[in-house]
Image (cartoon, grey):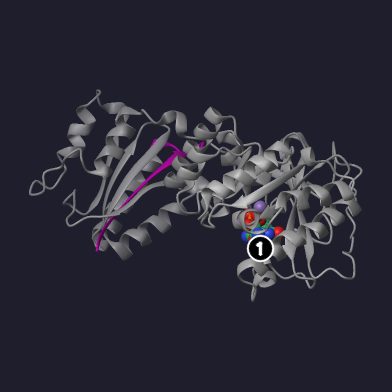
Amino acid sequence: MLTTIIYRSHICKNVPFTSVMDMVAVANVKNAQADVTGILLFNGTHFFQLIEGPEASVLNVYQHICQDARHHNIVELLCDYAPARRFGKAGMELFDLREYEGHEVLQAVLDKGTTKYQLIYNDRALKFLRTFVESTEKENYFEIPPADSWVFVTGAKKLSHTSVHTGAVVPENAADCSFAFQPMVDPFAQKILSTEALLRTPGGDSPASYFAGLSGNALYEADLNSKKVAFAMARALNLGEHSVSVNLFPMTLVMVPDAVDFLLREIQLNGLVPEQVTVEFTESEVISRIDEFTGAIRQLKGAGISVAIDHFGAGFGGLLLLAQFQPDRIKINSELIKNVHKSGPRQAIIQAIIKCCASLEISISAVGVEKVEEWMWLESAGITQFQGNLFASACLNGISAVAWPERKADL
Ligand code: C2E
Ligand code: MN
Ligand code: MN
């Protein structure tokens, strides 16, 4: 299968241009052997490369490129398939954009094209090429520092949340479930913004195992009833005036009579106030009864409870749901966050979500952040609220201390 990969990267400091020329000479031979064509553009700071050829060879070449220390912040922009090569000759061709006037370079590149299949702008690969030459996307290039410019210092300099109990609390004996707690943080402000209660079996197994074997009303009732334990544990953890989030299936509010009243009663019984509570709904559960669901949301909001859409971008009709009702917060699904610093498509989607939420004054948080680079990219894009193992993982019957990032240069 003829495969095309396009990436962009940033040249490392202290890499002389002669070393780039040497690299091209070596690649020219290697690519020819692998039947791969490389078109490399360089603008003095950024590289842009199109690689095409047989799938396995292209992937192999790209893997090597990703490990090359002469450039960093490599972002894959396109991975696509085509019936025939755009550029006939295998090998490697370098275009130094600084040596060309305006559109000349584009013509020079296109002149390398296989004449049999006339190159047209309709082709996504060529559109990427043109955009890079015209440098119209530059404001979206975030240059993030290497991961090792940060150290994570656990528990130090906690500005807020000092009263929170980081030890263990145990649910009442009668409870058939427990909870793990995980903080959501603003790493630069060194603040814990809220704490999420994640359902567990008494032995600490996942929500899926807790719900396994339950269906229909029993499932929704168990979901709602478990919140009694969540709020009691939040009280025992001394969450005080801090914010607490709980998760619910959207259908729990629809199927269980007086669900909102139940939540309000448990909140009050545990000395909490509705204003400090957020209910998170998993967007991937199909809401089949949207009218009743939005009715329940009105009740929650009317009582002072905030609403978040969880796993945003993962479910069915996510954007339609947002057109029908606007939550206080959106939590971006960890599947979208994974390796965002290396993926053009993920970056474009997250930037669109950020722009949409800014227009609607909806807060955004990123969930499942594991890598320093993911966090740095998201901060560059304007996200300030994070949940993930990078900072603190979910802790059964308690809250683990947060690892706060500090710049090495500042230590
Ligand atoms: P969620 O609300 O998005 O919760 C975050 C999940 O990601 C949690 O998994 C958490 O342990 C995990 N997580 C957090 N940071 C990281 C990370 O850096 N890496 C990785 N790999 N995972 C991370 P958990 O506790 O298994 O929960 C899974 C989902 O189950 C939740 O996703 C939520 O949608 C649902 N859930 C949790 N509690 C309840 C509940 O009480 N009722 C209902 N209906 N659903 C619940
Ligand atoms: Mn959640
Ligand atoms: Mn999740």
223 or 397: nearer the viewer: 223
- Residue ID at (41%, 53%): 65
- Quadrant where the image shows the C terminus: top right
312 or 18: nearer the viewer: 312
Whole-percent x, y for residue 311 in the image: 57, 51
- Residue ID at (37%, 62%): 60
Residue lying furthest front? 257
Is residue 8 in the magenta section?
A: yes
Note whether residue 308 is visible. Answer: no
Q: Which region of the structure is painted magenta?
A: 1-17
Query: Is residue 131 left or right of 192 when viewed as pictured?
Result: left
Whole-percent x, y for residue 356 in the image: 50, 33
Rendered image quadrant of residue 58? bottom left
Q: Give SS at disc 1.
A: helix
Q: Residues within 10 Å of mark 1 (few under 14, many from 20)?
A: many
- Residue ID at (69%, 68%): 206
Is residue 293 in the magenta section?
A: no
Whole-percent x, y for residue 131 in the image: 31, 33
Query: Is residue 76 left or right of 371 when viewed as pictured?
Result: left
Residue lying furthest left? 116
Residue lying furthest top? 101
The amino acid on which the numbered mark 1 sits, given as a three-letter code, is Tyr
- Residue ID at (61%, 54%): 254
Rendered image quadrant of residue 409? top right
Residue that carries the numbered disc 1 in the rendered image:
220
- Quadrant where the image shows the N terminus: bottom left
262 or 369: nearer the viewer: 262
- Count of numbered tags: 1
Note whether residue 185 is visible. Answer: yes
Whole-percent x, y for residue 186 in the image: 72, 38
